[in-house]
């Protein structure tokens, strides 16, 4: 299966966050943890300008609460618009 | 009958979702299930740029809660704007 | 009398909807029925681009709750903007 | 006195509406009656494109609740923007 | 002192409104009276297109609740944007 | 130290307002006084079009509640966008 | 590690603010202190126009409550859009 983000979007695998324990050792459920804000680019959209700036393998920093979640072969990914990319870490 | 999405829209047949049962075996009614977010393109609008990028038979991923439902010969379809297409699966 | 939709609008005669009865046979008043979403184009605006794409006699699908109602010789019509047309049925 | 609508606006004399009586014969006050939505064009703005499309004497159909009321020599008129004109009746 | 409205704005001296008395003779305070909507143009901004269309001495009709009040030598004026001018009376 | 407003902004020193006393002599605190709306331009941004229209030393009239306050060497200034400048007093 | 702000953004190290004590000597927690509004540019995005105007080492003044916080090697930075930069101090 081959997924291609549409136009100026990228497919991102969000960075793993370490398990968070509150004081007292209780494991916080997912919704209480702050969502990761960095991820690895897995696929780049067809927009040529974007393709010059962002490459597969780059780590991108993206704004909190942005992107659409998508599940592919039991892994969670995010589809992020170019306008929500804040920085690139190489 | 021939339906043609207008300009930069596509006609999509949403993917079947398996029947969802909550723990305890109760079948959840339609409104409680998460709406499918993938569908097969059945017809592409007249916009030339769109027609180059999306073909009949492609599977598109689209944003939740987008598209207008339309019923044709007792089947439900969605008319989705180009701007709501997130990715294409070939 | 000759009515001409302004610029990129069309004049549409909404499709008749069959009388809807709730279970138990009570006829639902107009406001409780879902509004029709297809109609026949009766007149096309002066916009040249539009006039190439939509012809008198076409059936158009339009977004729910769009269009302005207008009464001409005791019949109800809708004036619909090009941006609210979703598909054309020929 | 000579009033000229500014740029792409028209000055419209709203069509008279017949006195409305509720069942029981009580005359409804002005605010309870639905506002007229057709009017005769009395003056056209300076915008050249508009002046080609709308002529003094045309009847225009305009969206409900649009336009700015203005009183000239004890008669009420509306100044309506081109974008609020829905159709022209000739 | 020389005040020049910036770009596409005009400086307007709002028309005097006659003292309004409610039935019973009580003089209504300023805030209860409807604000004047016509005024005399005292100065025109530097925008060339505007300067061709509006001249010092013209009476302009402007939308209710628009414009910024400014006091110059104890007289109240309004600075009104071109987009809020509805008509010109010559 | 040299501060330069960015692009189409100006640095303004707001005009002093005389101490305001309510009837009865109570000095009104700052927040109850109407904010000054004129100021002297101290520095002009790098935008060339702006630099032609507004000069250091000009007095500008600006919309209420606009601009960002900034403190430089214990004096308060405002950074105001070109779009919030209403008039220039020379 | 090399972080590059995307397009027309800059990476800013916010200026240190002195510890704030309320009268009575209680140290105010972070959230009660007004956020710093100046910072030193650490990295400039790829946008060429921006790169001409803002250099690494410049101090920028930015609008309150703007920018996205990011932590790099235990130091807090802000990613700020060009449109939120108010002035440059050299």
Image: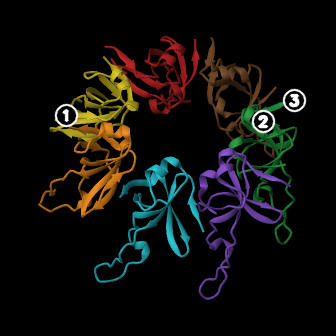
Chain colours: A orange, B cyan, C purple, D green, E brown, F red, G yellow
Residue at position x 84%, y 72% in the image:
D24
Dot 1: few (<14), some (14–19), or many (≥20) neighbours within 10 Å?
few
Residue C43 falls left or right of residue A52: right
Residue where numbered disc 2 is placed: D51
Dot 3: few (<14), some (14–19), or many (≥20) neighbours within 10 Å?
few
Host chain of mark 1: G
Same subunit: marks 3 and 1: no
Nearest to the observer: residue F78 or residue G43: G43
Mark 2 and mark 3 lie on one chain; the one further toward the N terminus is 3
The picture places residue F39, in percent across and down from the top left corner, at 50, 19
The picture places residue D75, in percent across and down from the top left corner, at 86, 43
Residue at position x 37%, y 39% in the image:
A48
Nearest to the observer: residue E5 or residue A3: A3
Nearest to the observer: residue D73 or residue B7: B7
Please state which of the two labelled residues, at mark 3 or mark 1, is closer to the viewer: 1
Separation (CA) of disc 3 from disc 1: 71 Å
Q: Are marks 2 and 3 in contact (CB under 8 Å)?
A: no
| Image quadrant in which the N terminus of chain B is located | bottom right
Please state which of the two labelled residues, at mark 2 or mark 3, is closer to the viewer: 2
**Taking D7 as reference, is C2 above or below it?**
below
Host chain of mark 2: D
Residue where numbered disc 3 is placed: D1
The picture places residue G65, in percent across and down from the top left corner, at 35, 38
**Taking G88 as reference, is D3 above or below it?**
below
Residue where numbered disc 1 is placed: G2
Residue at position x 14%, y 58% in the image:
A21
Host chain of mark 3: D
Question: How many numbered discs?
Answer: 3
């Amino acid at each position: 299966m081959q997924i291609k983000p549409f136009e100026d979007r990228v497919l991102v695998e969000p960075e793993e966050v370490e398990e968070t324990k509150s004081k007292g050792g209780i494991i916080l459920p997912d919704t209480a943890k702050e969502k990761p804000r960095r991820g690895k680019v897995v696929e780049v959209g067809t927009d040529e300008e974007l393709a010059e700036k962002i490459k597969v393998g780059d780590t991108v920093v993206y704004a909190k609460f942005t992107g659409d979640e998508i599940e592919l072969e039991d892994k969670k990914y995010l589809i992020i618009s170019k306008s929500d990319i804040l920085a690139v870490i190489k």
